Every structure is written in structure tokens, then in C-alpha cells.
Amino acid sequence: IHMVNSPSVHGKELAISALGAVTNAAEEAILPFLPRIMNELKVFLKAEGEGDEIRLRTQAIDTLSVFARKVGKETFAGMAGDCVELGLVNMGSDDPDLRRCIYSLFAAVSSTSPQPLLIHTERIVARMLETLDSTEGMTTEYKDPSVPRFDLDDSIEEGTGEESDDEDEVLGDYENIEGIIVENSYLEEKGDTLTSLSELCDNLGPHLAPCYEQIFGHALKYVDYSTPMVKRGALLCLAHLCNAFHRAISQHNYQDETGLFPKFVSVTVPCLLEIVRCDKEREIVCAALECLNEMIKEMGPAILGDEEYLDSLVEVIKDVLSHKTSCQKDAEDDDFGDDVDDESELSTVLLDFAGSILPTMAKVMGGKAFVPYFEMFAPLLIPKKGRNRVERSSAVGTLAELCEGMKECMVPFANEMYQVFRNGLHDTNAEVISNSVFGVGMLVEATGPTLVAKYPEILGTLATFLRDNGDRRTIDNVIGAVCRMISANYESFPISNVFPEVVKWLPLKEDLDENVNVYTCILRLLGNGDQVVTNQLPNLLPKIADELSNKKVDDKSKGVITELFKGVMTKYESVVMESLTPDQIQSVKQIIVTGCSGS
């Protein structure tokens, strides 16, 4: 904070940036300092002038965007209106970096407190589309500078609106063009504008519907753009707009009277598939795969129900997993020297993005319909000798998620998949081991009693990872896997030996996604009146109390934990009174009341 008043402009800029970085890491822990920080930033946010003033205002607005995302909805709600007004005042600036940060601020506000944006939506979008249309920062280079020429912008005669009569002169001038150079700041602005538009589509819902057609048309112009950051922004914008349009129709009863939605999908899906096949840039292919996955999650039947789309999707995923796409062929042909090691993301990241689509397909199609595709892809996914750790980890993780998607339809493949995960449990890499532990849990849950005979072996192996200096994500996945085993086959599980260990390693530290599974299992055991669970309540209750006040625990998990605590209070109130301090009991009760009133 002191450095914000540095005599050096660069020092001020760095200090403002550092405040954003600290807030990004600290999140709501920054709140005690927020009033003082905002007082310092207001000086730069309100300053007028060019040059250094714009530089500092741009950085201050960028930091303000971090606050919008990180300080919490309740805290930021009171600032949102002022942020929108600040953006409206500054978005007419001639500075591309300032405009880019303004658009990002609008996107950030839409993610937490969108209400103040709604009455200005069309005005904001119109300005952002002007940015995409603009030729600012473009310079034409000519093959022969000595040849007389005119400015291409003047090919329409000023003031008359009539085309130049000298067609030969125009044609000759075009033929003499070597290329067009765009300054980096303007390229970054276009890329970030498209990304911000995609986020506005996500967060403003049907309020943005009057602008859908214009946004789609502008984004489509940039899908063949040569600069990756711009092209990626265009792909994200197309996909997010389609998803937003689908939600507007399915969740908000928006009437697509002109039939734009199916047209948008019919353009976007083939475009993304073609990019995966043919684009040379791995970053762009990853973005296209990510967009396809998100679209299938949102509107699955609209894509997978089309036989042509489904067949094309299956083929492109096979191509990626077989290293046959254009960007992968180029990567194999390139000589990267010693700067790129086996652990790099040069090709394995593509496998991860492609593989992640398969569990989404399984969930949308249902396990029975997906079985033929599992049989097709399993040989490509099962880790082979010589694969690097990223490939092994990605493959095991994908297979684990496929167990979840296919459910009981995984039974015929249970023994084969168990062997894959068993091998992963003995891997040397912590990430592969963690994913394999997760995979064992998902497989057991999906296949019911099929693997009961393997329980002693599984539990023996999992126990080796429960140590004080062990990898914490792996430990969390062990607890998750054990709870899945209990839920799948309670009657065959040695509860008395294992459950105290589960409680010992709670709360989860790294893989909080397992919270719902873990606490749902405990809730069921409590409902069954399991004596082992009730005996562990004095150890369990303080941990539950901490979880309810943990801001990192999501609402769905807190809902299950709240239900668990209510059940304990109903049946074992005396145990609660003995296990928790009065302050803890009051705090938990207040959280539960607040949660119920807000639901």
C-alpha cells in the first residue's frame, strides 16, 4: 500500500498490480485492508489526463476486476454500480489497454453482481463490437514502397460515398500489398473483448438475447484469424453464446421466434470439429475441444442426437488419441531440442482435452448406449509402457470418470479396469496414484458387488498412502474411495476397522470435490444407526463444525453436512453438547439458520 505513493510511475504501477495479485491469492482475507486499498485506488480511478495517468488508471481498473471476483458477492455488491459507471465513462477512450480492462471489468461485475449492468447491456455490447470492427493499430506493408499508392481507407472517396473510378489503380495497389501488421495492444484488446463477451453471455442470460445475433456474427469473423489469442477468444465466444442461448430457452422460457439457435449450433459445431482436425496450433485445438465438451454438457442431445455430429465427434477424438491431427503431426515433425522434456504439454494436453469429452458423452448418452464407444476407445486410453506421467495420469483420470458415466454398464469390464487402476496404484508419480485411487473408488461404486472379493487387497494398498507426510490429494481420494466402497457394499465392509481412520483424516484438504460423497456416506451410516459411527461422533463433530464455516467448501457439500448435523442434533444432542464448545454450537446453529433462510 505504501508503494502506491511511490514517486516513480512504474513503482506505482507495480504496487497496484501487486495489490491485485495479493487479493487473487488471499481472496476474502483481504477484506480488513479493502477500505484503505480502495481509498488509494480512487486517486488513480478518478484522475484525468493522458500518458501516465491512463497507465495508472488502466492498472487500477485491472485490479478492481480482481476485487470483483475475489472479495465475495456481498462485499462487492455495494461497489458494483460505481464500477459500471466507471466503465461507462472510460470505455470511449482511445487507449486499447484501458478499453480492454474496462471490458474485463464488465465481465467481472457480471460474474458477481450483474444487476447494475442490465440497463446498459446494449450500449456496452455495441461499444465492444465497435472494437472488433475497428482497424485501429493496423499498418499496411507494401512489396515495393516506391510504387505510388493511396491509403486503403481512402478507397471510398471522402464525403461522397462513391467508389474511386480508377479500378486499375485500386487493383494495382492491392497487388502491391505484402501484409498488414497489427500492434500487439490492439490484438490483445480484440482477444480480450471476445473473451469478455463470452463471459457476459454466460452471466447475463436472456438479458443479452437482443444482441446474440450481432455478437455471433462478429465472433464468427475471427475464427480464421491468424493470431491465436484472438482466434481462441472467437471460439470461446461462439460456444458460450450457444450455451447461453440454450439456457435462455430451456430455463428462462425465451422464445427463439426467428430460429437462430439451431442455426448457431449448425455453424459452431462443424467449425469446432474442423479446427480440431486441421488447425496447426495446439492451443487453438485445445480451445476447440474444450468448447465442444462444454457444449455437450449444456445441450447434449442437441449435438449427440445428430448422427452426423456424433460420427464426426467420435472420429476427431480418435484422431487426437491416435496422434493423427494436423497439430500433432507438426509437433512430431518439429525438432524442439533440449528445451522440451518428456513431461511437457506439447501433445499430452491434447489427449487430456479429447479424453475429457468421453465421460461427458457417457453421461449424456447413458451407459448402455455408450458401451460400443467405450469398447472403441478403451484400447486407446489404457496406459501403455513408455507413456509419460501426464499421459498416464490423464488416461487413468478419464477411465475413472467413465466409470461414473457408465455406472452398472461397467460391470463387464470391471476386472480389466481394476487391473488398470491397480497398476496405477503402484506408479511412481503422485498424480497417477491419486487418479488411480479415485478410479478404484468409482469402479467399485459403479459395479456394486462385482469386486467385493478384491476389498482386502484394495484396502491394504490404500492404507499405505495414509501417512503424515503423504500426498494430501491422494489421502483425500483414499477417504473418498473408502466411502464409495462402504456405500456400494455396506454389508461386506469392515466398518469397525476402517471408519475410525476415515474420521482421523477428515476434513479433506485438497480434493474438496469428494466432500459430498464422504459426508453422504456418513449420513447414511448414521441413518442406519451404525454403532461405529455413533462412537466416533465426539471426534467427528468438531470437524463438521469447522467444515460448515469453511468458505472453500461449496454449497452442495454444506447442504449435506448441514443435514448430517441436524440428524446428530435430533438423535444425539447430549453428544453434541459434550463434543462442542458453546461458541461452536451457536456458530453452527447460526450458519444453519442463515443457510436455510437463504435457500
Image (spheres, rainbow, N blue to C red):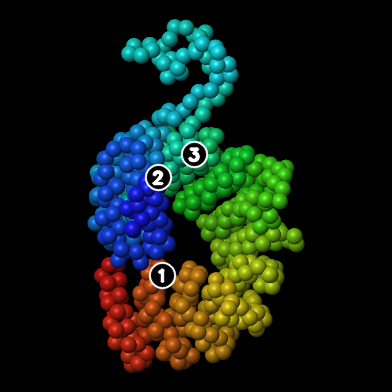
State the residue at coordinates (67%, 62%): 389
State the residue at coordinates (40%, 60%): 22
Tell me: residue 419, above or below residue 342. below
In the rendered image, the quadrant that contains the C terminus is bottom left
Q: Which residue is mark 2?
A: 196
Say what amino acid the circle numbered 3 marks. Answer: Val
- Mark before the other along the chain sequence, 2 or 1: 2
Dot 3: what SS? helix
In the image, which is nearer the foreground, mark 3 or mark 1?
Answer: 3
Distance between the alpha carbons at the discs numbered 2 and 1: 28 Å
Q: Which residue is mark 1?
A: 553
Callout 3 environment at 10 Å: few (<14), some (14 to 19), or many (20+)?
Answer: many
Q: Position of residue 281 (x, y in %)?
A: 60, 42
Q: Position of residue 111 (x, y in %)?
A: 35, 53
Distance between the alpha carbons at the discs numbered 3 and 1: 35 Å
Between 185 and 42, the one nearer to me in the picture? 42
Q: Position of residue 71 (x, y in %)?
A: 33, 61
Distance between the alpha carbons at the discs numbered 2 and 3: 12 Å
- Mark before the other along the chain sequence, 2 or 3: 2
In the rendered image, the quadrant that contains the N terminus is bottom left
Q: Which residue is mark 3?
A: 230
> Residue 379 vs residue 490: left or right?
right
Callout 2 environment at 10 Å: few (<14), some (14 to 19), or many (20+)?
Answer: many
